[in-house]
Amino acid sequence: MGDPSSIGPEIAIKALSKKEVYNYCNPVLVGDASSIINTIELLKFKVEVNIISDISEALFKFGRIDVYDLRNIKGEQLQYGEVSAVAGHASFEAIKRVIELAIEKQLDATVTGPINKESINMAGHHFSGHTEIYAYYTKTAKFAMLLVHENLRVIHVSTHVSLRQACDLIKKDRIIEVIELLDDACKQFGIKQPKIGVAGLNPHASDGGLFGDEECEEIEPAVKEAISRGFQVEGPVPADTLFSKAKGGMYDGCVAMYHDQGHIPFKMEGFVWDAETHQMKSVQGVNITLGLPIIRCSVDHGTAFDIAGKGVASPDAMLLAIQYATILAQHKYKAK
């Protein structure tokens, strides 16, 4: 469901109002029925709700959304566009429950809507994002964030930390770890021999040590070892050219050293701003957490509190996230 005060319920309802979704998966919306019903009534969506308390009660019928009701928030408590502990707790509990259902193998894959980190922390749940919540409750030590939009695939060495901390986290072993995760993910997407480009940390990948030593001390040794293990890897490649090369097909995947280094080029591709309406015309891109024992895909955009409850939010990223979750689930079953 995502944060109930955000566009999360709206984009979930819009996505599950598409008949084609039911042609390739059986979706269940985990969250609070009151929030979903309020959104449906407010925005006059032509869809019904089937409230359930167990997955076995789901109908998987187009036109009637199965909502696994957690009853964490009442309709009158909902205020669109506001940071609140109530909304934060409701969104956190939805994430936790969907993880439990997947671990129990009641679900084949999970897809998450946008959450507000401030709201979650106000509610007493001290996590920096979805990725860290999933890692904690699945007891996963080695994990990474992968962003996917068409042929651009970007994995991150570090994510939700300060830029100063991110520089300190550039270590050979971690870089090799994310290369392995990216290679495996690309193969799950049907790329038999992925070619991976690894970004430098410093401008011009340090120009032979002129602008820093992370490249020669950590990144280059990681690339060399990955090559010795049989991976097709190049780097360190200056970040200002790596992503344009990947977009053109030179690389099947990219390793970004820190959050914004990977997110900025990715969102330049997937997010389309409409200057006339002063709104996002389209928001595409999927966030996949690699290394988990369960499948987790997500939209790669925020809560958009400024347009919450207005009916103008794009479900494009949610639809893509559901599609990728299905692809990964199918690959998982074929591998068994």
Image: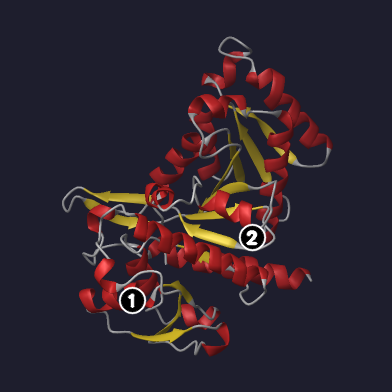
Which is more N-terminal, label 1 or label 2? 1
139 or 142: nearer the viewer: 139
Q: Residue 284 placed where, x, y %?
A: 41, 56
Q: Quadrant of the N terminus?
A: bottom left
Residue 301 lies, with reference to residue 27, above or below; the image says above
Q: Residue 253 placed where, x, y %?
A: 61, 45
Q: Quadrant of the C terminus?
A: bottom right
Residue 234 lies, with reference to residue 308, above or below; the image says above
Q: Residue 242 placed where, x, y %?
A: 54, 34
Residue at which label 1 appears = 34
Query: For the point 61% across and 68% down, which residue is it?
Result: 100
Query: For the point 58% across and 21% down, which residue is it?
Result: 205
228 or 92: nearer the viewer: 92
Secondary-structure class at tag 1 = helix
Secondary-structure class at tag 2 = loop
Query: For the point 77% across and 42% down, which residue is it?
Result: 231
Identify which amino acid the numbered label 1 is placed on.
Ser
Q: Alpha-carbon neighbours of circle 2 within 10 Å: few (<14), some, or many (≥20)?
A: few
Identify which amino acid the numbered label 2 is placed on.
Phe
Which quadrant of the structure image shows residue 299? bottom left
Residue at which label 2 appears = 189
Residue 238 is at least partly visible in this image: no
Tag of residue 81: none
